[in-house]
Image: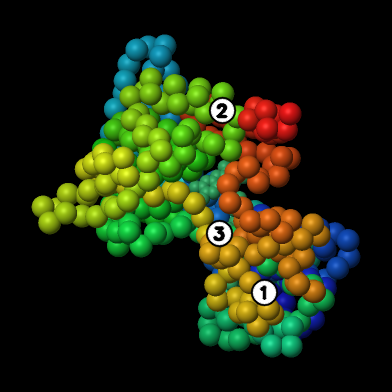
Amino acid sequence: MSTGVVMEETYDLVAIGAGPAGESAVELAAFYGFRAVVIEKNRPGGTVTTTGGAPTKTLREAALYLTGFRDRDIYGLDLAAVPGIVLPTIRKRTRDVSELLQRVTAENIARHNVAYVQGHARLGPGRTILVRTPDGQELTLRAKTILIATGSRPVRPKSVAFDDPAVCDSDTILALGRIPKDILIVGGGPVGVEYATICHALGARVTLADTADRLMPMMDGEMSRRMDELFRRWGVTIVLGASADTIVRSTAGNLEVLLSTGAKFQPDTVLFAAGRAANTEGLDLDAWGVKVDSLGRIVIDEHFRIASELVGIGQMVIHFGGTLRDFDQVPMNTPTYSYAYKYAAFDGLRRMDQQRSR
Ligand SMILES: Cc1cc2nc3c(=O)[nH]c(=O)nc-3n(C[C@H](O)[C@H](O)[C@H](O)COP(=O)(O)OP(=O)(O)OC[C@H]3O[C@@H](n4cnc5c(N)ncnc54)[C@H](O)[C@@H]3O)c2cc1C
């Protein structure tokens, strides 16, 4: 999908990436009368509409609804999901919601008179942006300001056998094609606890492992404790202070997970959801003298600037010249949330922050 003649055009703002960050920026720029274009290599709406918020929230809602999960406590009935019925329904609903949001995003962009270019963008010589379109053309755009809003993807450590179809990350689990019976989830952050809820509702045995000493460490400890209690009441096994050192398929054909605690598991599925890396490779940032950290993230200043004429927002940046070593450096005013069975949202100071600042 590309609108208008864009070859060799000059814009006030070129955004690379049509996720929530890029989309909001170009629409705001257009609202204030600037000429803007957004370039997207995948779908309008970014991760939210492909593998993130929209599909996972739909999956979660469908799983809770189709299994009568919310009413289990009232009627004392534990309805097992019938995979042959539930799976196609869930898949269709998830696809429909994602496509609807992609359509709505494309319409919003067009309504704001922002040009949309389908293709893979990178920075070119002489402050240009080069775009490879699906039909093999190369377009050259110029802009007063270039916005990098390329988002992030799941981290894939080498010790994890991602070439095994039963070893997933949050990008690939939606295409698994079956409901796990016994799943080990690595990562007790928002993605991990959300999938733990979904898989438990669908009748799977769930193990949740994290290197931290509590689930959702970016939230207040009391919220972590309540989430921990709820999961344990459901029969979810929680292993804290543990990293998944190796995940391999044995010669006997079993999937084997060895945790740093020495514990071994043989689940039928693994979801590796322990961190994300920025989509900055292939942008040719080097030519602009821009450095990235080991997770591909770019440091921005308080005005979101990376270099002159180059700004960055969204999930591929590190704020305010810091290095994001741990959650203590998440700015205090960054709200966090998780969609486990109970919603958990958090903003402001955690108890440990208050204790430290005394
Ligand atoms: C499983 C999961 C569940 C989530 N649930 C929620 C939720 O419920 N609520 C919530 O608020 N957030 C949720 N998130 C987080 C949310 O998805 C991100 O915060 C958000 O997508 C970040 O927006 P972004 O614009 O920075 O990046 P993205 O949404 O990742 O968008 C970046 C876009 O840039 C494109 N791109 C990358 N490189 C190039 C290139 N070279 N040329 C052209 N295009 C390029 C990509 O294709 C992508 O579309 C979830 C994430 C995951 C993984």
Residue 136 in the figure: left or right of residue 125: left
- For marks 3 and 1, the one nearer the N-term is 3
Residue at x 70% of width, y 44% of height:
331
Going from N to C along the chain, the mark reached first, 3 or 2, is: 3
Q: What element does badge 3 sit on?
A: strand
Q: Which residue is mark 2?
A: 221
> Dots 3 and 2: beta carbons under 8 Å?
no
- Against 309, residue 168 (above or below) is above
**Label 3 crowd (10 A; few <14 / some 14-19 / many >=20):** many
Q: Type of residue at label 1?
A: Val
Q: Which mark is residue 152?
A: 3
Is disc 2 in contact with disc 1, using a CB cutoff of under 8 Å? Answer: no
Q: What residue is drawn where x is 50% and y is 24%? A: 225
Give above or below for 212 relative to 131: above
> Which quadrant holds residue 262?
top left
Q: Is residue 88 in view?
A: no
Q: Which mark is residue 126?
A: none
Residue under label 1, please give it: 290
Q: Dot 1 lies on which element? A: loop
Label 1 crowd bin: few (<14), some (14–19), many (20+), radius 10 Å? few
> Which amino acid type corresponds to the residue marked 3 in the rendered image?
Ser
Query: Whole-Å distance between the Cαs marked 3 and 2?
Result: 27 Å
Q: Residue at x 57, y 79 (%)?
A: 133
Residue at position x 51%, y 55% from top? 276
Q: Is residue 151 visible?
A: yes
